[in-house]
Image (cartoon, helix red, strand yellow):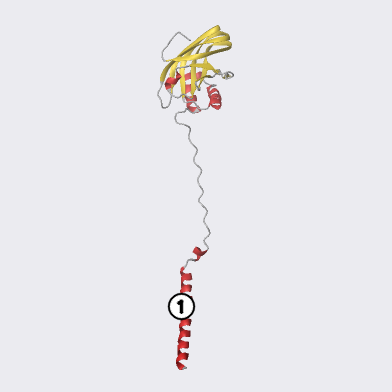
Amino acid sequence: MGRSLNLGLRIGVAVMFAAALTAAVAAGVLAATPAGAQTMPPQPAPATPSPPPQPPPSNQFSPNELVDAGHRFFGGVSRGLASVVEKAVSQWGQPNGYILGEEAGGAFVGGLRYGDGTLYTKNAGDLRVFWQGPSLGFDAGADGARTMMLVYKLPRTQAIFDRFGGIAGSAYFIGGFGMTALTANDIVLVPIRSGVGFRLGANIGYLKFTDHPTWNPF
């Protein structure tokens, strides 16, 4: 009987010791665990910054570049040039080339126009060009003019050697400058003219560009 009582007491003491040890270990684990790790809320993803605005293509000329080139070319008669360039850029965008040159023409019902100059580009070099073309309409007079031509969508310099026809309703006049538009194979050519003489009436026609001078306008 005594032996059974002693065994029961030893078992009871062992169970109590094991329970106390388990409680101590659990308390130590909880104490070692950071409090913030138990209730850490999910962090929001960092905001993605907006991409920077893309600069204009490097092969195009800005309005300021065109006006500066025109001022140097036309000299003291260039007061209305900025307005004409602004009108062209608002309608067709920024050109990837322009021509500076001189031309002369005359008409009595039927007329002719001849000119020569240089095509300027940013990354394809410069090119000497000549142009000539007929016109037909209610037109009379003679003129000589310095001419600046804005060139749009030119895929390569040699593509300028083509025949460009007029775009209806594209005429614009301000401050002594006149602007029209011509097109061929998706290329748009915008001649801006200022000069002496006079041409009365309206006419239709085209300009043919060549790499050498010729008297044949056709």
Rendered location of residue 146, percent (x, y): 48, 16
Which residue is drawn at the image coordinates 54% and 24% (left, top)? 88
The amino acid type, in three-letter code, at marker 1 is: Leu
**Residue farthest bottom in this picture:** 1
Q: Residue furthest left?
A: 125
114 relative to 200 in the view: left or right = left
Q: Secondary structure at mark 1?
A: helix
The foreground one among 197 and 1 is 1
Q: Residues within 10 Å of mark 1 (few under 14, many from 20)?
A: few
Q: Nearer the viewer, residue 191 or 178?
A: 191
Counting from the top left corner in percent of width and height, residue 32 is at 46, 69
Residue 148 can be seen, yes or no:
yes
Q: Is residue 91 left or right of residue 216?
A: right
Q: Residue at x 53, y 22 (%)?
A: 81
Q: Quadrant of residue 213?
A: top left
Q: In this rendering, does residue 75 appear at all?
A: no
Residue 89 position in % (x across, y down): 53, 26
* Residue, disc 1: 21
Total marks in image: 1
Where residue 76 appears, x then y in whole percent? 50, 19
Front in this rendered view, residue 173 or 131: 131
